[in-house]
Amino acid sequence: MRIQGELVNHLPWAESTAGQSLVESSAPPSSNDHGTPVTGERDTKAQEVLRTLVDATSKVAEAIDEVHELEREKQEAEELALVSERSRKETRHDRSVRPAFVVHL
């Protein structure tokens, strides 16, 4: 979580730096899938860093989602194991209880 926060905190700086380097390169801007300004073959180093930062942030978010899903599945499995064990114990206990009296006809 800390890493994702740091990546997100650096996005405004990276966008600003990439925009400034774009102006300095005086190439006409376009945009990619992320809405990040790019200049095709003439991307500046700052733009490459921004693109890498955006991609890393996305990958970290996906990894965090996967971890949360695995933790949820693990918790469900542990709860199921506890319920199964309790059921086995109760079943054993029920079989060991004998009636106090038996009526013979």
Image: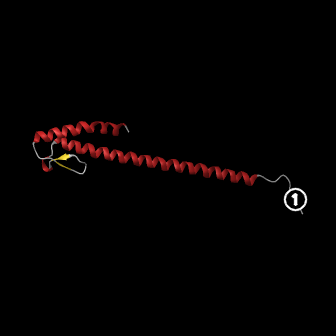
Q: Residue furthest right?
A: 105
The x and y percentages for residue 40 are 15, 50
**Which is nearer the eye, 20 or 88?**
20
* Residue at (53% x, 51% y) in the render: 77
**Dot 1: few (<14), some (14–19), or many (≥20) neighbours within 10 Å?**
few
Q: Residue furthest bottom?
A: 105
Q: Position of residue 45 (x, y in %)?
A: 17, 41
Q: Is residue 43 left or right of residue 82?
A: left
Q: What residue do we see at 75% from left, 52% from top?
A: 96
Expressed as whole percent of the image width and height from the top left, the position of residue 90 reads 69, 51
Give the residue furthest to the left.
26
Q: Which residue is mark 1?
A: 103
Residue toward you, 40 or 16: 16
> How are the colours assigned in the image?
secondary structure
Q: Is residue 79 left or right of residue 23?
A: right
Q: What's the residue type where badge 1 is placed?
A: Val
Quarter of the figure with the C terminus:
bottom right
Q: Secondary structure at mark 1?
A: loop
The residue sitting at 19% across, 37% down in the picture is: 17
Q: Is residue 4 above or below residue 92?
A: above
Q: Report the label total.
A: 1
Instruction: Give the residue displayed 38% in from the left and 39% down from the top.
Output: 1
